[in-house]
Image (cartoon, helix red, strand yellow):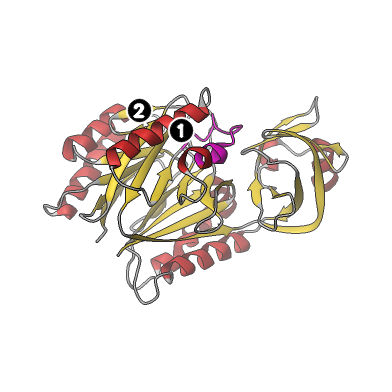
Amino acid sequence: MLETVYSVSDNLDPLAGIRNVVADCREQLGGRKPAAGMFFTSCMEADYVQMLEEILGAFPDIELIGCTTDGEITQDRGFTEDSSALLLLISEEIAFAAGIAENISETPQESVANGYKHALDKLNAEPVLAFVLPDGITTMNLPIEAYLRSEMGQSMPIFGGSAGDGFRIVQTFQFCGEGVYTDAMPLLLLAGDLEVSFNIAIGPVPYGKYYRINKVEGNIVYTIDGVTALEFYERFYGKYIEDRELSFFPLAVYTGDKEDFVLRDSVNIDREKGSISFIGRFEEPCRARLTQVTRDETLNSGHAGSAQVLSAFGDKSPDLILLFSCTSRRHVLGSRTDEEFLVLQQDRQGVPYFGFYCYGEISPFTNDGPVHFHSDTCISVALRSK
């Protein structure tokens, strides 16, 4: 069986808040011993070392990973910001092991390999699932999905979200055990008889014709449809669009002749070169379509995704649903952000859910398919111990 307890606090004093969270979790445990944990916080001025000391002082033997975010998601409170949330996992059947890939932008292949090996050695079993939380800024130009596939396997189910920093786009932090890192990727491996179901909720709707991306280097697009990327965007959105405004008009990107697409959000315009930088790389050759983004479509996709993972195991309920939702969805929804989880809130079985708003989501398209990097989605991962 997989059991969970969690707590969240938006206390103005982050250290006092995490102490309240720890006390609440300890009371809920009632003597049970947690094996693993996830810690998310959108408090960007906090002393993370002290916060981790509070968690590990109370639960010293857990395999703990976490990161900074653009807001937390919990069953009790829905969306919160300037808050801290802790999830503890309890199971005698499921094994957990955490690892850390350090300096990931400098030596990505080696870092991912070392982090995975460290966790795998501790797990001492065949992993059935992995969660990863890469730095959301230093990995923008990295084919992070390619390194995960190479080191962890083409068919390993890998899910997660990129660490955020409250939409400042300055620096994010990652946690593994008692360590505080930046430019890193914590990972948590799970082994045991575990059922997994997931959904990729896509808000933006592609429309119109396909355009060839003529020149791209990593995450920088230079020309689309024979003109500069900036001229292409100005054709549809006008000449005075700013960097942050452009991020609300993602491209739907299709690799080769595939029907599946990933979304890419722009992050910076180089007006001298006419190029645009995006979060996430482009696999060549690729085509793109424009998208329409509305609150209703964003909410509808989230509601359909929630309904799908809730019903994934027939007449049995998931033990837990983990959520990795793009920060762009939060900014599109604005005051309606909490409505994204309305279906989960109305679930009569009360399945616990927990997650955060991130700078990019990680998930395969299919159960046995390779992992991909996504934007503008909400990844829902339902877990059930057999």
From the image, tell me which residue sits under label 2. 180
Residue 284: horizontal and vertical position, in percent?
A: 72, 41
Residue reaching furthest to the bottom: 315
Which residue does the image show at 34% across and 33% down from the upper left? 118
> In this rendering, does residue 13 appear at all?
no
Mark 1, Cα crowd under 10 Å, few <14 / some 14-19 / many 20+, is many
Q: Nearer the viewer, residue 358 or 106?
A: 106
Residue 31: horizontal and vertical position, in percent?
A: 11, 52
Q: Is residue 184 left or right of residue 291?
A: left
Residue 279: horizontal and vertical position, in percent?
A: 62, 38
From the image, tell me which residue sits under label 1. 112
Q: Which residues are magenta?
A: 134-148
Mark 2, Cα crowd under 10 Å, few <14 / some 14-19 / many 20+, is some
Residue 250: horizontal and vertical position, in percent?
A: 68, 47
Q: Quadrant of residue 309 in the image?
A: bottom left
Residue type pointed to by label 2: Val
Which residue does the image show at 18% across and 54% down from the upper left? 28
Q: How many marks?
A: 2
- For marks 2 and 1, give the CA distance: 17 Å
Instruction: State the SS at label 1.
Output: helix
Q: Is residue 142 left or right of residue 384?
A: right
Tell me, yes or no, whether the highlighted magenta stretch contains residue 144: yes
Tell me, yes or no, whether the highlighted magenta stretch contains residue 37: no
Give above or below for 198 relative to 64: below
Q: Quadrant of the N terminus?
A: bottom left
